[in-house]
Image: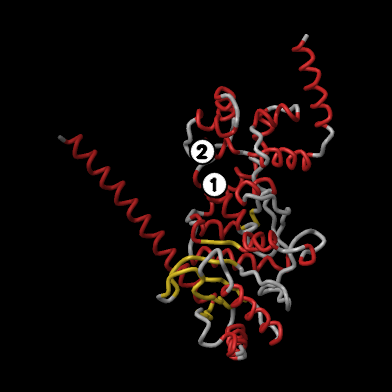
Amino acid sequence: MNHNTSHSRAAGRASRYAGLELEYADQIIAGLRAHGLGYQEIARTLGIRARRVEATLGEIGVLHGRGVSLTEIAVRVGLPRSTVHDIAGAQQRQSTARKTAVLAAISDMHGMQRDVLGWFLGMERNHVLSLVKQLHKEGSIHKPAEVQAGEKWVVPTRVTAARYLGWRPADWHPPLGLAEHYRAVAQARVMLVGADRALWVPERVLRHRIGKTAGPNGKTRSGEPLLSSGRTPLLGHPHVHDGRFLGVVEGTYGWWALEVELSKKDPEHMDIALKGAIRAARDATEEAMVGVLYLCRTPAVIDNVNAAYDRLPDHEFGEVLALDLLVRDFDQKWRKFLTDYAARREAAKAASSNRRRRTLIHLTSREAS
């Protein structure tokens, strides 16, 4: 009788849950997990199976892909080991290190075009296409979409992005007017730091940081903070960089703010953008900034930024400001990167060919003996 009563209650919960839209179901599951409930508790509360919880959270797949033992996974997610074994064994996808790197990167950067993703991973085009196809089949990304001329965009689903960012972002698709800018920022990351997340703080994270401290008057109707940036300078609003990276730029090591400028601005807007970028670097608390790097397309844009620099007031931006400001040619840097990248790929192929040749010679020698 107790069993039947329990079954009836579960059926009632399942019936109520079945009426929810998928979007709200994911939010409820993620919210319960954020409040400390384990998989089994969430499943019982909502009257669903643990597999459904895993479909939203994906923690078992990620941990299993990292080589964490089933016993430890069971403790972390709050499930019997046998259930974890069944879920991990039944999952068609395997969370490999490469998949994790891709999903983390496109979550950080909002998305990437397939060719940029290839440079990011150091993979040939056919391998990138195969990987993207697999990720779409698994439901980790949206269907690749062509926005501007060139390669299609690879964009994570909202649920996937939430796993890697640590919060639930708004769903994102590359806007036509800004697609080239997002592409250029992704290229800059590839050039400057590559795939190491520890060396890169994306704009998405910087916006989230500011949003957590912004009051209601500093937010839009959607709840997003109203911020100034290089592409949309707004006087009187906090500035968000295109990214920050840890590395060496012309002999100076440390955290650098990145600004990517693709088009010339009128002097007023360029002044707002440059002052905001410098102030944001100066006032940063999470990273100790050493400078601001501008990567600009065309000599006219470089002159535009340099002219704004010459107009900076000395009382705020003079010698007392211990930050470097470097303005460099984006396309020149990118051409050099592609040349170096091609050389590294050829060297790797040659080394691989030599290894195979040495192995063949070794085996032939053994047969002869």
**Crowding near the residue tagged with mark 1, few <14, some 14–19, many ≥20 C-alpha atoms within 10 Å:** some
Give residue 100's mark.
1
Residue at left offset 83%, top offset 27%: 15
Where disc 2 sits, the SS reads helix
The quadrant where residue 44 appears: top right
All told, the count of numbered labels is: 2
207 sits to left or right of 368:
right
Residue at left offset 51%, top offset 38%: 65
Q: Residue furthest left?
A: 369
Task: Judge by depth and name the residue closer to the eye, 274 or 119.
Answer: 274
Give residue 275's mark.
none
Where disc 1 sits, the SS reads helix
Give the quarter of the figure containing the N terminus. top right
The quadrant where residue 88 appears: top right
188 sits to left or right of 342:
right
Labels 1 & 2 near each other (Cβ < 8 A): yes
Task: Judge by depth and name the residue closer to the eye, 142 or 83.
Answer: 83
* Amino acid of disc 2: Gly
